[in-house]
Image (cartoon, rainbow, N blue to C red):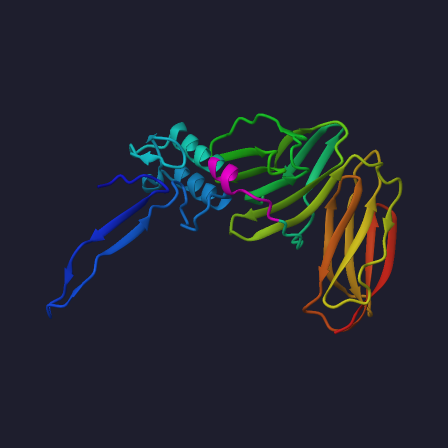
C-alpha cells in the first residue's frame, strides 16, 4: 500500500494460477523496483536534469513533483507530500543526490567540445566560474588524484528560482557542481578555492540553455605549472587527419584579459568553423576539431589574442 519506499523492490508471488481452459502453472514471482526519489525522468540516476525539473516545478507550484516530508534514510526514503514546496523538498533532493554521487557517481570524461570554452577567473588560489544569462542548468566536474581534496567550494546562498549543489568525492578523485536556474536568469558566478601546489585538475563541463540545448561542453586543465608568457599555436595532431585533429595553444598571463578566437578557414579564406571565442584564463588549451561534414583539402587554423595572431596549415584527407 502506498506510499512506497524509494529505491526498494516489491515482489508479488503467485502460488497457483489457472486460466479459463483449466490450465495451471507452477509458482511465479514478479519483482518490481521502485524508482529513486527525485528521479523525474526515470533513467535510474539523479543529475542536473532532475534538478532542473524540480526547480521549474517548484517555481510553477506544480505539487505533483514535490518530494517532502520524507522519513527514513537515503536512498530508502518514504515520501508523504504535503502540497507545498519548502526547504524540506530541496533537502530531500540534495540528500538523495549526495547519496547517489557517493555510491554511483563518476567522472564523465567527454572531451568533445561544443561552443566556447568555460569562462573562468583565477586570482592566486581563488577561482570563479562565470555563467552567462543564457545558461539555465548544467554540470561541472573536477577530476584529480584519488585521496586528494584540492578544491573547496565557497558557501552559496541559493536565491529564489535556483539550486546549486556540490559534492566532494576524494576517495574517487572528483568533485562535482550541478545547478538549475529558472525565471529571469542573469549572469552569475560560482566561486571556490584551490589548494597551494596543485599539480593538475581536469574540469569537465556541460552547460544547457533554456531550450535544453547544450551550448558549452568540453574540458579544461588547471595546474600549478608556470603560466605561458606569450601566445603560441602548436602543430595540430594528427596532421594530415581524418576526421578529428587536436589543436593546442597558449594564452599568456597579461594585465587585462582579452578575447581569444580560434577559427578555421578553407583554402579560399572563408570562415568555416569557430572553435574558440571568448575570454580565457592564462594557460595551455587543447581543442578538437571534428571535420566530418567538411570536404578533403587544405584548411587554416588561426589563433588571435588581442593583436597577436598565429596561423597554421592543416590537411583533411578522407
Q: Quadrant of the N terminus?
A: top left
State whether residue 169 is above or below residue 309.
above
* Residue occupying image coordinates x 51% and y 43%: 104
Figure label count: 0
The residues colored magenta run 99-108
Tell which of 179 and 255 is nearer to you.
Answer: 179
Q: Position of residue 41 (x, y in %)?
A: 41, 50
State whether residue 182 is above or below residue 291.
above
Residue that sits furthest to the front in the current view: 26
184 sits to left or right of 39: right
Q: Quadrant of the C terminus?
A: bottom right
Q: What is the magenta segment's predominant secondary structure?
A: helix
Residue 49 is covered by the magenta coloring: no
104 sits to left or right of 230: left
Residue 103 is covered by the magenta coloring: yes
State whether residue 123 is above or below residue 231.
above
214 sits to left or right of 92: right
Tell which of 237 and 124 is nearer to you.
Answer: 237
* Residue occupying image coordinates x 55% and y 33%: 166
* Residue occupying image coordinates x 76% and y 37%: 223
* Residue 184 in view: no
* Residue 111 in view: yes
Q: Position of residue 124 (x, y in %)?
A: 76, 28
Tell which of 23 and 295 is nearer to you.
Answer: 23
* Residue occupying image coordinates x 35% and y 30%: 72
Q: Position of residue 199 (x, y in %)?
A: 76, 35
Q: Position of residue 133 (x, y in %)?
A: 59, 41
Amino acid at each position: 500500500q502506498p506510499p512506497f519506499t524509494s529505491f526498494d523492490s516489491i515482489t508479488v508471488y503467485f502460488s497457483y494460477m489457472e486460466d479459463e481452459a483449466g490450465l495451471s502453472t507452477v509458482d511465479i514471482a514478479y519483482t518490481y523496483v521502485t524508482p529513486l526519489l527525485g528521479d523525474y525522468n526515470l533513467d535510474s540516476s539523479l543529475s542536473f536534469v532532475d534538478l532542473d525539473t524540480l526547480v521549474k516545478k517548484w517555481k510553477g507550484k506544480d505539487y505533483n513533483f514535490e518530494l517532502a516530508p520524507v522519513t527514513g534514510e537515503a536512498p530508502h526514503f518514504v515520501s508523504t507530500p504535503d502540497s507545498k514546496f519548502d526547504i524540506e523538498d530541496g533537502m530531500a533532493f540534495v540528500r538523495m543526490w549526495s547519496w547517489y554521487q557517493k555510491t554511483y557517481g563518476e567522472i564523465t570524461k567527454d572531451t568533445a567540445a561544443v561552443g566556447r570554452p568555460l569562462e573562468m577567473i583565477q586570482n592566486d588560489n581563488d577561482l570563479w566560474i562565470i555563467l552567462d544569462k543564457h545558461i539555465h542548468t548544467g554540470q561541472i566536474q573536477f577530476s584529480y588524484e584519488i585521496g586528494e581534496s584540492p578544491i573547496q567550494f565557497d558557501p552559496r546562498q541559493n536565491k529564489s528560482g535556483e539550486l546549486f549543489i556540490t559534492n566532494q568525492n576524494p576517495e574517487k578523485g572528483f568533485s562535482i557542481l550541478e545547478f538549475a536556474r529558472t525565471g529571469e536568469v542573469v549572469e552569475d558566478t560560482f566561486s571556490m578555492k584551490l589548494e597551494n601546489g596543485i599539480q593538475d585538475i581536469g574540469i569537465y563541463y556541460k552547460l544547457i540553455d533554456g531550450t535544453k540545448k547544450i551550448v558549452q561542453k568540453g574540458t579544461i586543465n588547471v595546474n600549478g605549472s608556470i603560466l605561458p608568457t606569450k601566445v603560441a599555436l602548436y602543430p595540430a595532431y594528427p596532421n594530415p587527419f581524418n576526421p578529428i585533429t587536436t589543436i593546442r595553444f597558449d594564452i599568456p598571463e597579461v594585465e587585462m584579459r582579452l578575447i581569444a578566437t580560434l577559427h578555421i578557414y578553407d583554402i579560399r579564406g572563408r570562415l568555416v568553423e569557430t572553435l574558440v571565442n571568448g575570454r580565457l584564463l592564462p594557460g595551455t588549451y587543447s581543442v578538437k576539431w571534428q571535420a566530418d561534414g567538411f570536404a578533403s583539402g587544405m584548411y587554416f587554423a588561426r589563433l588571435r589574442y588581442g593583436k597577436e595572431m598565429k596561423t597554421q596549415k592543416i590537411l583533411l584527407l578522407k
